[in-house]
Image: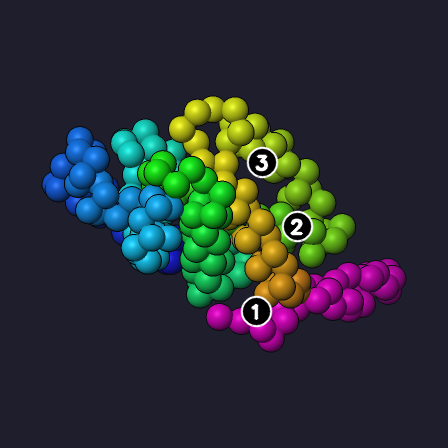
């Protein structure tokens, strides 16, 4: 539910950019809320950290980000619950924005949801690690994708590695703190024909995981 709502908000913001001409005009893009460190630090326009996270520079940009959000968001939302997933998203968005403000060139505009999406990536790895042996496959199956994305972040011009790294770290740390893995509950299972007893276990959600 929250994942779909975030996608809808991003798409509506993109439609607004088309309507206002922000995709063709730097002045309109600045007016609509693109993140420029100098404007944040000198004019105290901290709200740009939020607004820039919902703006995109073109159809391919928003398309790729929304596909990533749909893929990652649904999983994180199921595991953490809707509201915790939303918290992870916005904490990652804010931290990625702050990383841009303090570590990017002062006059370079930045926009896009990728900082928050990298936060969801970090959340996925935090979940896998806290699950222990049960989360090994989750970590292994996604580590290559993460490494590839980080390589792109540092090698391709026009991509904000600051946003990606800041969001990734924030999402990982925040999720590691708030996520409590389900507790295994062991129960005997009996074979009615042979009378043999087998050990089995179920996953009991921790009380804090119920949303």
Which tag, 2 or 1, sits closer to the chain's start?
2
Q: Residue 128: which numbered mark, if any?
A: 2
* 159 with respect to 28 (left or right): right
* Neighbours of disc 2 within 10 Å: few (<14), some (14-19), many (20+): many
Q: Quadrant of residue 159?
A: top left
Can residue 96 be seen here? The reply is no
Structure colour scheme? rainbow
Where residue 69 sits in the image (x, y, percent)? 42, 44
Which tag, 3 or 1, sits closer to the chain's start?
3
Magenta region: 183-211
Q: Which residue is mark 1?
A: 209
The answer to whether 185 is drawn above or below residue 86 in the figure is below
Quadrant occupied by the N terminus: bottom left
Which residue is found at the position 68% from the left and 38% from the top?
A: 140
* Neighbours of disc 1 within 10 Å: few (<14), some (14-19), many (20+): some
Which residue is found at the position 49% from the left and 64% from the top?
A: 84
Q: Secondary structure at mark 3?
A: helix
Which tag, 3 or 2, sits closer to the chain's start?
2
Of badges 3 and 1, the one in the foreground is 3
Say if the magenta span includes residue 189: yes
Q: Residue 2: which numbered mark, if any?
A: none
Q: Secondary structure at mark 1?
A: helix
Where residue 139 sits in the image (x, y, percent)? 66, 42
* 119 with respect to 11 (left or right): right
Q: Which residue is mark 3?
A: 146
- 67 vs 65, nearest the viewer: 65
Q: Quadrant of residue 90?
A: bottom left
* 54 with respect to 101 (left or right): left
Where residue 134 sits in the image (x, y, percent)? 72, 51
The residue at the far front in this view is 42
């Amino acid at each position: 539910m929250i994942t779909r709502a975030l996608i809808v908000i991003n798409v509506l913001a993109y439609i607004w950019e088309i309507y206002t001409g922000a995709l063709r005009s730097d002045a309109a893009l600045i007016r609509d809320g693109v993140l420029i460190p100098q404007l944040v630090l000198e004019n105290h326009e901290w709200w740009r950290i939020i607004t820039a996270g919902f703006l995109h520079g073109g159809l391919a940009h928003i398309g790729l980000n929304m596909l990533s959000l749909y893929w990652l968001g649904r999983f994180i939302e199921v595991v953490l619950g809707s509201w915790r997933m939303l918290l992870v998203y916005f904490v990652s968005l804010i931290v990625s924005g702050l990383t841009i403000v303090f570590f990017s060139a002062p006059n370079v505009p930045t926009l896009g949801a990728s900082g928050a999406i990298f936060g969801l990536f970090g959340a996925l790895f935090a979940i896998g690690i806290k699950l222990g042996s049960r989360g090994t496959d989750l970590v292994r199956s996604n580590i290559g994708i993460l490494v590839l994305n980080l390589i792109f972040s540092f090698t391709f011009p026009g991509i904000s590695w600051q946003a990606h790294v800041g969001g990734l770290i924030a999402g990982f740390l925040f999720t590691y703190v708030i996520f409590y893995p389900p507790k295994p509950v062991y129960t005997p299972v009996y074979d009615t024909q042979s009378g043999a007893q087998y050990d089995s276990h179920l996953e009991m959600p921790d009380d804090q995981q119920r949303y």
